[in-house]
Amino acid sequence: MPLITNTVWNEGDIPTAAALNAPYDSAATASAAVDGDNCKDNWITIFHFGSGNPCNNLYSFVYDGTSEFSTSSTSYVTINSTGVNPAEISLNYVPNQYEVLRLEASGLVTNIDATVTYDETLPVGDRGNPNYYAFRLLLTYNDGGGNLTISLGEWGYSFTSAGGDGRYYTTLPGDPEETGVPIGYQTFQFSTLYPYTGTTGVRTLVKVELQAKVYDNSNVLKIDRNNIIAVRAKH
Amino acid sequence: MPYVKPVTFVTATSLNSADINSNDDALREWINEGSVSGDLAADSFNTEEIALGEYQPITNEYYFQTGIDTGAAIGTDVIDRAYFTSHTKKSRQTDPALEIWQSIYTTGPCITLERTADVIITFGGAFVSSENNIVTNGFWDSETKLAYIYNDVQALTFVNQTRSFTFEEALMTATVSGSNDPFGAMSKPSSGLGVESPEITKGLRRWIGWTAILTSLPAGTYKFSYYVDPKVEKGFSSARNFKAEVFYK
């Protein structure tokens, strides 16, 4: 324990060299590794944090323009509104064990083209599936071999408002069904956490992508502004 | 660098005051200004060593050494509605190009940054744009954006990554009047089936939600608010909430 010791001298004591050296040697040892035992509570403030090694690291991708990304893909594709600037953030760091990566994403669905929102040829219970589209956050990581991916979550939305009486919107194929009015220009927004429980130094987090897909390729999902925010909470 | 004692006392050698003073002076210098970050042991300081944060209950703000956390939430009570209107200028309703941005209260904080920081703001709100009575063309779109005023610069700085729209809840017999069609490429649904229903117009409501990041904002005071450029005679936001997080760099 790096606390400084000292000899209490009494009248008439003859000091030894070892006793005289002791407090200075103790101070020298403690000074090389000052820790919580040497310090008062509440002494660390923002001014003591090194600017090159903050407690949190923030990463972000922001597209705030009006170019639309369109997709009819039934498998996930990375949103790329301008064609040259995919919605992804580069991480490229090695997390410590029990570190948490927090992720936020949001955007604006714009001029949707919802041709099919109901399919009576599908099994009962699945007939409303064409109405769906979804987003996911895809994490790419590397454990020493090739890059691998893991889905951090999927978030589903529908092209039209919920079903109910008196709806106008009709769909194909099959008989018209009341699946509500189309919802263009609705926002999407979600968040998730990725806790890393593996061994420190093993995994490299490479990047996170914001992706989208539709259930039925007759429908077109269009997105303009979108963003991803990641907060590395260091452990 | 760590303290190094200048003199080592040796047995059977006369003790003199200069040697003791030399050791004490070196120690004093290390304690006063000589200690550096390299002297601090790694992984040894915990939350008790970090200065406590402060909570300001009036403004609901938490101040921490690494940043600020604040937020607010409003329910659906009528008294809490934040109204907006296009009637501040007589030509406003028929001139889509004329922009008049109105602040919606309880949609953003006023934050004083003590140093350069990244700021994350998360927002969600219910917006209603009632049907116009005077200019009855339907489905006007009112654009909404986060904006802020920095220090005494009174111009708004818009945050386009928050751009959204609230649509006039007109009957299906109306035509689309705004720049954006709330129904997308399919345009207005056929009105040939069923009966006009309140549920139809309420299908025009959009919950507006976004998370925005503003990076490397310099120190200073920022008055954030969500703004609307109204094209309806009466619109309002009812339930809404926001959260702002400041990460000092």
Image (spheres, coloured by chain):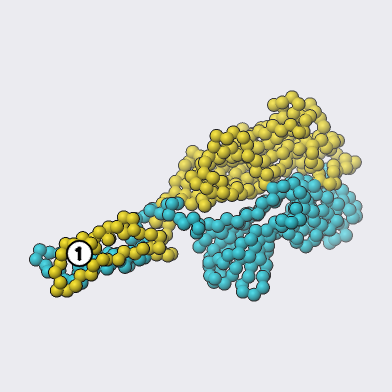
Chain coloured cyan in the rendered structure: A
User: Residue B179, position in %: x, y?
Assistant: 79, 39
User: Residue A98, position in %: x, y?
Assistant: 53, 65
Does residue A205 sit above or below B89 in this rendering?
A: below
Quadrant of the rendered image containing residue B145: top right
Give the residue drawn at x 53%, y 39%: B221
Taking the image as shown, residue B53 lies to the left or right of residue A62, namely left
Quadrant of the rendered image containing residue B223: top right
Give the residue drawn at x 76%, y 33%: B97
Q: Nearer the viewer, residue B113 or B208?
A: B113
- In the rendered structure, the colour chosen for chain B is yellow
Does residue A192 sit above or below B177 in this rendering?
A: below
- The quadrant of the image that shows the N terminus of chain A is bottom left
Does residue B1 sit above or below B157 in this rendering?
A: below
User: Total number of numbered labels?
Assistant: 1
- Secondary structure under tag 1 reads helix
Residue located beneath label 1 in the image:
B19
- Chain on which label 1 sits: B
- Residue type at numbered disc 1: Asp
